[in-house]
Image: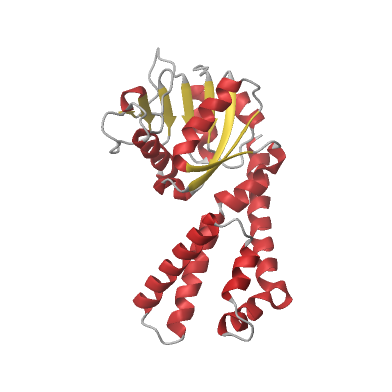
Amino acid sequence: MSAVLAVNGPLWMIGCGNMGGAMLSGWIAAGLDPRQVTVVTRTERFGPPGVRHLTAVPADERPEVLVLAVKPQQLDSVAPALAGLSPAVLISILAGVEEAALAARIPSAAIVRAMPNLPVAIGRGVTALHTGSSDPAVRMLAEALAAPLGLVEWIADAGDYDAVTALAGCGPGFVFRFGEALAEAGAALGLPADQALRLARATLAGAAEMLAASDETPATLADRVASPGGSTREGLNVLDRDDVMKRLMKATLAASAERNAAMAAAAR
């Protein structure tokens, strides 16, 4: 039986959009007491039962854990109301916002950067973590919060965060685009569009499950599907010609990483 997720003291979440909401739902499903949670958003919205929802930071209260889940460009608009809170741990999911920029705006005992991706909504995501804190309790708390959401990866060098964000944070968007292209290619061969989409979805899901469960590389698995002279090999020959697929993905991730770096520079 897995342990129930527990946090010592109040947990506040500032902002609760798609990603923040998915994380919060995952935490409560893992056993976090919703009565410990306060969500602060600009507008009234429905939240998980038992969670306190406010439209302004409450006076004369202090969270133990502060989760910053607004859009990166909203940091300077929310920071003044949070500057005096001094939480024990600040967890930020703001893409491109470095630890120093957070510390300058919201002083706290420890800061953890977390980069979740969208599949945390179904407990199959990736959350990359980095902290400059040497306190084992801080790392244990961050990992306990990330574990119910999927794979947890600690990033030793903060300088790698732009690359991690491009690969894992942005990656689901690229996979969805590939799924769209796969379905449209099937329809172009004459299949009904709705059927092609169902086939593409199931094919992606099955292949992803197989890759996740295998110790072999994606290249090895691809070669196992492709018999010499067969139809899969003919299709792979198109993708492999001049390394077109690899070059496209390298350019895609490079563009995302460059944007992450630009956002970090703007937030300093």
Q: Quadrant of the N terminus?
A: top left
Tell me if residue 83 comes above or below residue 114 in the rendering: above
Tell me if residue 122 comes above or below residue 37 in the rendering: below
The answer to whether residue 147 is left or right of residue 264 is left
Residue at the far left: name it.
49
User: Could you say which is closer to the camera, residue 9 or residue 221?
Assistant: 221
Q: Is residue 245 visible to us here?
A: yes
Q: Is residue 262 visible to us here?
A: no
Task: Estimate the x, y position of residue 3 in percent, counting from the top left.
Answer: 41, 29
User: Could you say which is closer to the camera, residue 229 or residue 136?
Assistant: 229
Residue at image x 63%, y 24%? 104
Task: Estimate the x, y position of residue 2 in percent, counting from the top left.
Answer: 40, 33
Task: Estimate the x, y position of residue 224 in percent, counting from the top left.
Answer: 60, 72
User: Could you say which is closer to the camera, residue 157 or residue 137?
Assistant: 137
Task: Estimate the x, y position of residue 60 in percent, counting from the top left.
Answer: 40, 12
User: Could you say which is closer to the camera, residue 208 or residue 74?
Assistant: 208
Residue at image x 43%, y 81%? 187
- Colour basis: secondary structure
**Residue 6, quarter of picture:** top left
